[in-house]
Amino acid sequence: MPEGPSIIILKEAVQQFKGKKITDVSENASVDIGSFKGQKVRDIRSWGKQFFICLEKNTIRIHFLLFGSYSINEQTKPDKSLRLGLFFPNGALYFYTCSVKIIQADLDALYDWEADVMSDIWDASRAREKLKAMPGTMVCDALLDQKVFSGVGNIIKNEVLYRIMLHPETRVGKIPPKKISELIRETRNYSFDFLNWKKAYELKKHWLAHTKKTCPRCNLPFIKKYCGKTHRRSFFCENCQVKYD
């Protein structure tokens, strides 16, 4: 599943279509896209893992789910995984194996932009308030809660917890205040590190914990466990990642 930084890269890559008119559409999605043709792209936005193409009359929302992808200005052959193709005078944009929805409402009324860890208006104090309201939640689940840390996925979760030496099964209410501050700060910091490494095509070489077998600090085997209610893979070291009780 693409995480927030990957969606930022997509948003930057498709700025060429902003202000351009959609000349044709192809689709294999269960939505009525007939109204897209002839509309101009007013804006390109993102919120966490969601991508928005804002048109004159409505908005296209793309969520890449677990295996979604996209391509830009490529000559494509018929593909059953294609969900939406948008054609412009200066190129084409294709989305595969993803969720496509039409939004009629004002996005500002639907989304909390201050919760997006990549946003210029990210509000760390509000993240702290939200964490305070979920004392019984495991931190591995809290990090994946899009209402608190929009854009954070499993890679960021595992790497941040390893970076700050925090056990994924620690309950939020047990984490010391200074460690909460570190958690919030490094979640945003790592997200921008992720973005820079992804742009340089070297993200995986910087992974210290995610999918790894041995802790580079302790030289001990990592634990791989499906933690919390989200039941997503966690990779952690029981020696150096503290579980607060």
Image (cartoon, rainbow, N blue to C red):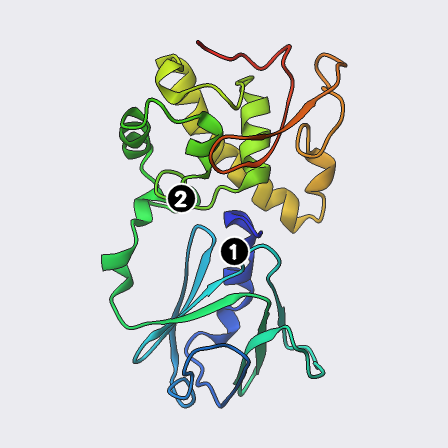
Q: Nearer the viewer, residue 142 or 117?
A: 142
Corner quadrant of residue 149: top left
Residue located 43% across and 78% down the image: 31
Q: Is residue 245 above or below residue 188?
A: above
Residue located 46% across and 85% down the image: 22
Q: Nearer the viewer, residue 35 or 119?
A: 35
Quarter the C terminus occupies: top left
Q: Using residue 65 as the reference point, say whether residue 34 is left or right of it.
A: left
- Does residue 226 appear anywhere in the picture? yes
Dot 2 falls on a residue whose secondary structure is: loop
Q: Is residue 92 above or below residue 143?
A: below
Q: Is residue 21 above or below residue 2?
A: below
Spatial CA distance of label 2 from label 1 is 14 Å
Q: Using residue 163 as the reference point, say whether residue 217 is left or right of it.
A: right
Residue located 47% across and 53% down the image: 49
Classify mark 1: residues with Cα within 10 Å, few (<14), some (14-19) or many (20+).
many
Dot 1 falls on a residue whose secondary structure is: helix
Judging by the rendered image, the residue that carries numbered circle 2 is: 146
Q: Position of residue 137 (x, y in %)?
A: 39, 27
Residue located 54% across and 65% down the image: 98
Corner quadrant of residue 13: bottom right
Classify mark 2: residues with Cα within 10 Å, few (<14), some (14-19) or many (20+).
some
Residue kind at label 1, given as amino acid type: Ile
- Front of the two marks 2 and 1: 2
Judging by the rendered image, the residue that carries numbered circle 1 is: 7
Q: Using residue 114 as the reference point, say whether residue 14 is left or right of it.
A: right
Q: Earlier in the sequence, mark 2 or mark 1?
A: 1
